Image (cartoon, grey):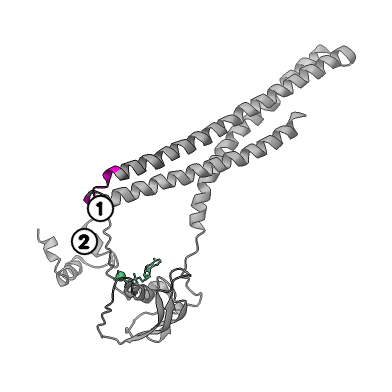
């Protein structure tokens, strides 16, 4: 047991070090993954600018760094077991030295007692060595789960109030009352905008890129809350309404479209799963996409 405090001290140091290495591995791994994701999704752009070679080179770079970080982490983890084994060996040395001394000097200590202790020490270290190994796996899992929890703990920007009002049947009277909004602190996207859109009115926002047209649409959907002022529909501040009810009353055609896997039918039906086939075809007709269903 003499060895235990020393072992405890060193293993605490070692543990922090190993943990940091595994965290590094995770960071590198996510860099590889995000690069892969971008490369595959943006393959057309890469091809059209003939950047395949640069892209490949960059990939080799992050890949190599990931390999190195794995290498470091695995080496450090592999040190753990020999370290426990070595502590075991030191314990045995101490036992043999002190035991021999006692056999010679203390008549109460027989050879049998000495031998039993050599067995005890084996029984004592075996579980510790196993725990050490498990601990290693635990460290690895912890650094992975940390990243998952970081993601799970992320708070949504938009929160529904507890006593939120259900807006069932929206007339469509939209008012922006001195709305100021910024995505990040240092840049304002909308500067105190006031406007009114009446029910049944068709409104088009025209402006150059980055002037805030999509931002206005985002605020009507309450993807974000204004930093100052208020957005109101039918006289109710959007911060006071239920999100589901609000969004079910709004149809959005996004600037960048996204098609889910499945059939075209299922994709058109996405916002209203109970729509009949006829209704889906009717909707497709309205936008001139009904020849998709011709055959
Ligand atoms: N998710 C975001 N995070 C941070 N800033 C953003 C985000 N989306 C837009 N912005 C910034 O907010 C401002 C307004 O952008 P917005 O997308 O509303 O412009 P837009 O008028 O729709 O442009 P476009 O005509 O290109 O669609 C821009 O400066 C833009 O860079
Ligand atoms: Mg836009």
Q: Position of residue 74 (x, y in %)?
A: 52, 33
Dot 2 or dot 1, earlier in sequence: 1
Stretch of the chain drawn in magenta: 48-53
Q: Is residue 196 left or right of residue 95?
A: left
Between 105 and 108, the residue placed more toward the observer is 105
Image quadrant holding the N terminus, namely top right
Q: Position of residue 279 (x, y in %)?
A: 20, 69
The image's mark for residue 45 is 1
Query: In the image, is residue 200 above or below residue 287?
Result: below
Residue 129 is inside the magenta segment: no
Q: Is residue 2 left or right of residue 104?
A: left
Quarter location, residue 273: bottom left
Q: Residue at x 34, y 82 (%)?
A: 170
The image's mark for residue 265 is 2
Residue 49 is inside the magenta segment: yes
Q: Residues within 10 Å of mark 2 (few under 14, many from 20)?
A: some
Image quadrant holding the C terminus, namely bottom left
Q: Residue at x 26, y 82 (%)?
A: 203
Query: In the image, is residue 140 above or below residue 235?
Result: above
């Amino acid at each position: 047991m003499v060895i235990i405090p020393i072992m405890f001290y060193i293993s605490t140091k070692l543990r922090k070090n190993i943990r940091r290495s595994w965290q590094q591995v995770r960071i590198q791994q996510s860099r590889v993954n995000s690069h892969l994701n971008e490369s595959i999704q943006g393959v057309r752009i890469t091809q059209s600018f003939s950047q395949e070679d640069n892209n490949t080179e960059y990939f080799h770079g992050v890949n190599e760094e990931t390999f190195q970080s794995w290498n470091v982490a695995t080496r450090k983890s592999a040190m753990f077991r020999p370290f426990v084994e070595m502590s075991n060996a030191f314990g045995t040395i101490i036992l043999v030295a002190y035991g021999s001394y006692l056999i010679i000097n203390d008549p109460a200590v027989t050879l049998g007692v000495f031998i039993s202790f050599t067995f005890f020490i084996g029984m004592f270290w075996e579980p510790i060595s196993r725990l050490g190994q498990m601990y290693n796996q635990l460290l690895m899992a912890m650094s992975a789960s940390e990243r998952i929890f970081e993601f799970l703990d992320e708070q949504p920007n938009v929160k529904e109030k507890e006593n939120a009002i259900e807006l069932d049947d929206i007339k469509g009277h939209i008012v922006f009352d001195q709305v100021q909004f910024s995505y990040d602190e240092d840049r304002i996207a909308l500067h105190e905008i006031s406007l009114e859109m009446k029910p049944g009115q068709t409104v088009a926002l025209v402006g150059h890129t980055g002037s805030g047209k999509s931002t206005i649409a985002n605020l009507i959907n309450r993807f974000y809350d204004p930093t100052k002022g208020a957005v109101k529909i039918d006289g109710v501040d959007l911060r006071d309404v239920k999100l589901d009810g609000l969004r079910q009353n709004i149809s959005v055609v996004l600037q960048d479209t996204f098609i889910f896997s499945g059939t075209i039918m299922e994709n058109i039906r996405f916002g209203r799963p109970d729509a009949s086939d006829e209704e889906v075809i009717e909707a497709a007709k309205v936008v001139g996409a009904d020849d998709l269903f011709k055959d």
